[in-house]
């Protein structure tokens, strides 16, 4: 049922197969988890197949270690006609001490499609319910404007076509 689920949290243990040679979860694995949680949230809101269109401002703040409980929280912060912006935070908690820390955060944009190889399809409009959600939506709109201005700087014809 679309327009209902605006937040998703995945929880699991960081495992030895997730880490690099330094014993910390590598960034590629964290990005995979972010994409999965964001996708689940986007589909939960739109009720449609969704694709990742952009990831902005990804920050790796603190390391995630083997045995940490990882929580990946994706939260809808803005909707367009067929797009959805999600704030995604990755938290890591040491089971021995109970200390929880922000490990990674970013904003993602997903686009709903009418079928897997289809065209963009409308999504239900999301309306902030409190001051915190209004603040997040303002940040999303600001990021959207920055993104549009960056697009003008990117040569979409490809590199080396001087």
Image (cartoon, rainbow, N blue to C red):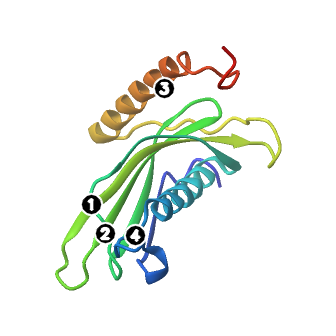
Per the image, label 4 sits on a secondary structure element best described as loop
The alpha-carbon separation of the residues under discs 4 and 3 comes to 29 Å
Image quadrant where one finds the N terminus: bottom right
Task: Quadrant for residue 109, please give it.
Answer: top right
User: What label sits on residue 159 in the rendered view?
Assistant: none
Mark earlier in primary sequence (4, 2): 4
Q: Position of residue 136 (x, y in %)?
A: 35, 37
Mark earlier in primary sequence (3, 1): 1
Question: Badge 2: how crowded within 10 Å, few (<14), some, or many (20+)?
Answer: many
Front of the two marks 4 and 2: 4
Q: Are marks 1 and 4 in contact (CB under 8 Å)?
A: no
The alpha-carbon separation of the residues under discs 1 and 2 comes to 9 Å
What residue is disc 3 on?
Answer: 147
Task: Quadrant for residue 96, please give it.
Answer: bottom left
What residue is disc 4 on?
Answer: 25
Per the image, label 1 sits on a secondary structure element best described as loop
At 36% from the left and 29% from the top, the residue drawn is: 138
Question: Badge 3: how crowded within 10 Å, few (<14), some, or many (20+)?
Answer: few
User: What label sits on residue 62 in the rendered view?
Assistant: 1
Q: Are marks 4 and 2 in contact (CB under 8 Å)?
A: no
Mark earlier in primary sequence (4, 3): 4
Mark earlier in primary sequence (1, 4): 4
Q: Nearer the viewer, residue 18 or 85?
A: 18
- In this picture, residue 128 sits left or right of residue 116: left
The alpha-carbon separation of the residues under discs 2 and 3 comes to 29 Å
Mark earlier in primary sequence (2, 3): 2
Front of the two marks 3 and 1: 1
What residue is disc 2 on?
Answer: 92
Q: Position of residue 117 (x, y in %)?
A: 83, 45
Q: Position of residue 3 (x, y in %)?
A: 58, 47
The alpha-carbon separation of the residues under discs 1 and 4 comes to 10 Å
């Amino acid at each position: 049922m679309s327009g209902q689920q605006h937040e998703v949290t995945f929880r699991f243990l960081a495992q030895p197969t997730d880490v690099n040679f330094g014993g910390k979860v590598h960034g590629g694995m964290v990005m995979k988890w972010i994409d999965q949680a964001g996708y689940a949230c986007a589909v939960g809101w739109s009720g449609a197949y969704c694709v990742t269109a952009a990831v902005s401002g990804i920050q790796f703040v603190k390391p995630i270690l083997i045995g940490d409980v990882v929580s990946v929280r994706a939260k809808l912060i803005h909707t367009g006609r067929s797009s959805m912006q999600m704030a995604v935070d990755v938290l890591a908690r040491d089971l021995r001490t109970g200390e929880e820390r922000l490990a990674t955060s970013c904003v993602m944009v997903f686009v709903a499609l009418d079928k897997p190889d289809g065209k963009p399809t409308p999504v239900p409009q999301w309306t902030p319910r409190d001051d915190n959600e209004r603040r997040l939506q303002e940040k999303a709109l600001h990021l959207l404007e920055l993104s549009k201005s960056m697009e003008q700087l990117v040569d979409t014809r490809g590199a080396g076509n001087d």
